[in-house]
Structure formats: C-alpha cells, structure tokens
Amino acid sequence: MRTYKLTIEKKPYEIEVKAFNLKEATLEIDGKVMIVKVDEILSQPNSLQEPVARAEGKKAEKPKAAAASKPAPARPANAPAPAASGGTAVKAPIPGAILTMDVSEGDTVEVGQLLLKMEAMKMENQIKANHAGKVVQILVKPGDAVAQGQDLVIIE
C-alpha cells in the first residue's frame, strides 16, 4: 500500500501499511510485521477515514518471499484482472469505504449490474459488474476501507 518515513522522539522509522480496515491494520515497521487494533476514528480528513491505531503487541508472520516467475502478459487497461481463485476480480477504482453490498455470493450478474456502493471523496460511487457471470467470492463488507486497485468481488 503506502510506505512512510517517520521520526518519533528523534528516532527514524520506516513504516509500510500492508493492509487496513476500520478494525485493524497490518504494518511493517523497520522490517517487523505487526497487527494493530483501531480503537476509534478521531477525524475524517478530506475523504477517507484514516484509522488511528494502537499496538496490540500481536505479531503477524512475515510474508514469505515470492518465487521468481515470468511476468504476466500485458492486458488492455479496461480488461478485468484475473483473480487468484480462478474468477475475475472487480477492483476498487479509487480508495474509499464500502457502504452497501448489492449482491451475494452465488448470485448471477449481468454486465453493468450494481455490485456495491462505496464512498470516496465524500461521493457515493456505484461499482458495477464489468462482465457477466456468477459471484463466487465477496472480499469486502460494509464499513471496510479499501485501497485503489483492491479486489472487491470475484466473478467467474
């Protein structure tokens, strides 16, 4: 996601935000992966609610290094991305927060059918199916904060 260089009490830290939602965040701080709990949202600067987190002391496993592989073939910019589960992922076009889910796993959807609504930059955005198929996995729920490009729904 994002990497920050911070100085706390004159000590520099490099912090990478691996994942976050309104309940917890996964951070890598100077190479050490930690999961922190979000206690409460104190403010909402400009658009997204930025979580204010407190360390729980709970350690996450370090991600394993990925094996080298051939680069994926190029695809058109408007083509849906293939998902790990064998389906095709519908991705968040911009960072935001999930408001409603308008489909359920197992539903059959048509091109242009409303899948979910999300708030981004104080505007409600409708996320629609970019191809017809069956919803095989829903990866978010109302209240989740999502990053640009994050997989939301898998359709096969």
Image (cartoon, rainbow, N blue to C red):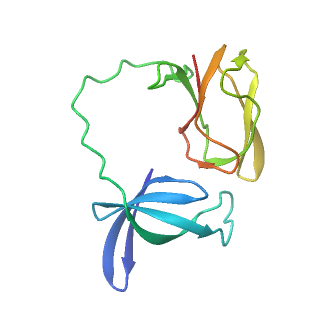
From the viewer's perspective, is 36 left or right of 39?
A: left
Residue at x 65% of width, y 48% of height = 96
The image shows a total of numbered marks equal to 0
Above or below residue 28? Residue 147 is above
Quick one: which residue is furthest to the left in this view?
68
Above or below residue 79? Residue 140 is below
Above or below residue 32? Residue 142 is above
Residue at x 58% of width, y 37% of height = 139
State the image coordinates of residue 145 (x, y, percent, origin top left).
61, 51
Q: Quadrant of the C terminus?
A: top right
Above or below residue 49? Residue 117 is above
State the image coordinates of residue 108 (x, y, percent, origin top left).
71, 16
From the viewer's perspective, is 38 left or right of 98?
A: left
Residue at x 26% of width, y 44% of height = 64
Residue at x 54% of width, y 19% of height = 79
State the image coordinates of residue 30 (x, y, percent, origin top left).
29, 65
State the residue in front, 150 or 37.
Answer: 37
State the residue in front, 148 or 41.
Answer: 41
The image quarter containing residue 11 is bottom left
State the image coordinates of residue 27 (x, y, percent, origin top left).
41, 60
The image quarter containing residue 29 is bottom left
The image quarter containing residue 42 is bottom right
State the residue in front, 77 or 152.
Answer: 152
From the viewer's perspective, is 96 left or right of 24?
A: right
